[in-house]
Image (cartoon, helix red, strand yellow):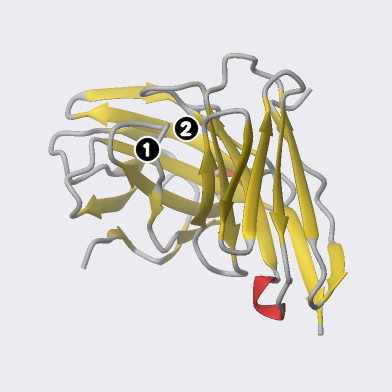
Amino acid sequence: EAQVTQNPRYLITVTGKKLTVTCSQNMNHEYMSWYRQDPGLGLRQIYYSMNVEVTDKGDVPEGYKVSRKEKRNFPLILESPSPNQTSLYFCASSLGGGQNEQYFGPGTRLTVT
Amino acid sequence: QKEVEQNSGPLSVPEGAIASLNCTYSDRGSQSFFWYRQYSGKSPELIMFIYSNGDKEDGRFTAQLNKASQYVSLLIRDSQPSDSATYLCAVNAGGYQKVTFGTGTKLQVIP
């Protein structure tokens, strides 16, 4: 089954404790992206990647890191999480870039206390 | 000014009516336009995409694009209670560039 998977689905952590949210797709998509969704602010792009080892900042990259060492994986790293990073996070992928349909993972609800 | 603007709603329509959802964007270089539907607690899923000026129809859904006015809309004919969701407009400047979403319009279809 073609899909985007994210882990964990739910995470509660404390300020400053490094964490990684994994994202994997099995569709051989070149383009992968991370979004956060907050009430009243909608989906905002954090980082995106055009292919292996090629990433670029979205609209809200501060406090986040990403890496793309393999085509299928695009982890999101929070080196020192803060409460303002409490949010719902979505990973997405598409074939050939942002001009094509994006397939979204199920989401990761992160709470930073 | 937000890059992609949508009325947050809620937009309430009776079952069987036409729902009209609107979106404006600020980047004149935008090339790709998408409508995603998101049910509460779920991830977004694509409803329609449109690249050229004019109308594009798919079943009960019609996307309309007017690049001169920087305006894209989604019409849902014969609205059903199952259409009740938040509809997200997304815009891309082409190629491997970022995608910008609007904040979404919540649609309620009243039986």
Amino acid of disc 2: Gly
Residue lying farthest left?
A70
Graded by Cα atoms within 10 Å as few (under 14), some (14 to 19) or many (20 or more), the crowding at tag 2 reads some
Q: For mark 2, name the chain.
A: A
Q: Residue at x 23, y 35 (%)?
A: A30
Total count of labels: 2
Mark 1: which amino acid? Glu
Is residue A18 among what the camera can see? no
Sequence-earlier tag: 1 or 2: 2
| Viewport quadrant of the N terminus of chain B | top right
Image location of residue A17, percent across then percent down: 39, 48
Residue found 40% across the figure and 46% down from its top: A102
A45 or B66, nearer to the observer: B66
Instruction: Read off the residue under disc 2.
Output: A63
Q: Front-most of B38 and A101?
A: A101
Q: Do tag 1 and tag 2 residues touch (Cβ < 8 Å)?
A: yes
User: Which x, y percent locates residue A60?
Assistant: 54, 30
Task: Say which element carries label 2.
Answer: loop
Residue drawn at (51%, 21%) of the image: B93
> Which residue is under mark 1?
A79
Along the viewing direction, whichever of A109 and B81 lies nearer the viewer: B81
In this picture, residue B81 sits left or right of residue A33: right
Name the spot of residue B54 as percent of width and height, x first: 64, 33
**A92 with respect to B20 (left or right):** left
